[in-house]
């Protein structure tokens, strides 16, 4: 304590304490104001730092997205794009595969179709975000696969990529309206004779567009998905009996038109499962056309033999 302060305290202690209390009361508002100002300055500084950090993060995300959009080929991981290994022997889709080279695609919006529920639609800009559940829905939901084709008609490589996904394939093969057809040759034959079913499928604008595009037809025909269909019990039954298959084709106007499609003919000749029987399937002989009635009984007899 200073000498002057000490002298005041000794001379009149009561007056000294009273003076000190009054001084503290006067200083209190000023101290409070200084504390409030200091708190406000700290808050402003924190907000400023947060805004700067947010701007920097946003710029990083934008630049990263732009880089991916500018270099789509690099963005597609070839490890995820697996297709069919063509071999002379019967192919097992669960074993060896080769890479499908995916080329850069055009910029386009991602379509979303609502058929009772929202369907996932694959594109080059969202495929990495796809989950197994997304692929399962595409395979299991009626017309979901067709809808994905409708949104990617200009991108056969991307559709080959989709058709290589085993989750999607298995979901499609296990559908209640698909599995029985691939198990029983008789049911597959009956389906081919269902005019309404044939019309609903082949008169679809999407199917017409696919069949009119050579690259798309070859992508589908050489896909892992198509391999599973061709090695199914019912389809293999007719592959082993190409004459019966030819009669069925000749009796069905939609399949007859498919037989005459130049892109389909090339795809059949290239397919490892079909090229050996291609001369019979593509011949379209008058004899085959004249005997469609024999197909069903023959298929029925052979189907019983297969079941045994």
Image (cartoon, helix red, strand yellow):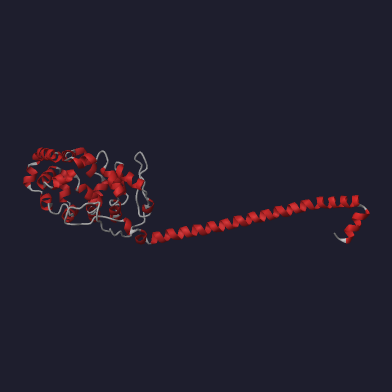
Task: Report whether 290 appears left or right of 146.
Answer: left
Q: Residue furthest left?
A: 287
Q: Where is residue 184 in the image (x, y as percent from the top left)?
A: 18, 40
Nearer to the camera, 9 or 175: 9
Task: Report whether 213 appears left or right of 105.
Answer: left
The quarter in which the N terminus is drawn is: bottom right
- Number of marks present in the image shown: 0
Q: Name the residue at 37% across, 42% down.
A: 118
Q: Is residue 89 above or below residue 179?
A: below
Residue 80 in which image quadrant: bottom left
Q: In the rendered image, is residue 32 in sight?
A: yes
Q: In the rendered image, is residue 198 in sight?
A: no
Q: Is residue 157 above or below residue 305?
A: below
Q: Name the residue at 93% across, 54% down.
A: 11
Task: Report whether 166 appears left or right of 54.
Answer: left
Q: Where is residue 84 in the image (x, y as percent from the top left)?
A: 24, 55
The quarter in which the C terminus is drawn is: top left
Q: Name the residue at 92% across, 55% down.
A: 10
Q: Where is residue 17 in the image (x, y as percent from the top left)?
A: 87, 51
Q: In this view, does 174 lie above or below 48?
A: above
Nearer to the camera, 141 or 105: 141
Q: Where is residue 249 in the image (x, y as percent from the top left)?
A: 13, 45
Residue 262 in which image quadrant: bottom left
């Amino acid at each position: 304590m200073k000498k002057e302060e000490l002298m005041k305290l000794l001379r009149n202690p009561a007056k000294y304490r009273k003076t000190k209390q009054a001084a503290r009361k006067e200083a209190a508002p000023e101290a409070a104001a200084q504390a409030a100002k200091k708190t406000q300055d700290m808050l402003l500084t924190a907000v400023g730092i947060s805004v700067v950090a947010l701007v920097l993060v946003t710029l990083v995300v934008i630049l990263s997205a732009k880089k991916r959009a500018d270099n789509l080929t690099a963005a597609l991981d070839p490890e995820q794009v697996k297709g069919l290994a063509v071999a002379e022997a019967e192919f097992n889709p669960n074993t060896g595969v080769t890479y499908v080279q995916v080329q850069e695609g055009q910029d386009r919006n991602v379509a979303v179709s609502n058929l009772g529920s929202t369907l996932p639609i694959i594109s080059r800009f969202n495929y990495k975000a796809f989950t197994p559940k997304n692929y399962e829905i595409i395979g299991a939901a009626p017309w979901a696969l067709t809808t994905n084709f409708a949104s990617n008609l200009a991108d056969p490589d991307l559709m080959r990529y989709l058709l290589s996904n085993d989750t999607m394939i298995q979901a499609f093969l296990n559908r209640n309206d698909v599995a029985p057809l691939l198990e029983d040759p008789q049911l597959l034959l009956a389906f081919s004779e269902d005019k309404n079913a044939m019309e609903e499928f082949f008169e679809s604008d999407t199917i017409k567009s696919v069949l009119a595009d050579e690259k798309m037809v070859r992508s589908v025909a050489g896909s892992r998905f198509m391999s599973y269909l061709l090695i199914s019990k019912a389809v293999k039954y007719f592959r082993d009996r190409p004459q019966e298959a030819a009669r069925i084709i000749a009796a069905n106007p939609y399949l007859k038109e498919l037989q005459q499609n130049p892109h389909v003919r090339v795809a059949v000749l290239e397919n490892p499962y079909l090229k050996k029987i291609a001369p019979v399937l593509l011949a379209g002989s008058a004899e085959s056309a004249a005997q469609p009635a024999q197909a069903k009984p023959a298929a029925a007899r052979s189907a019983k033999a297969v079941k045994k």
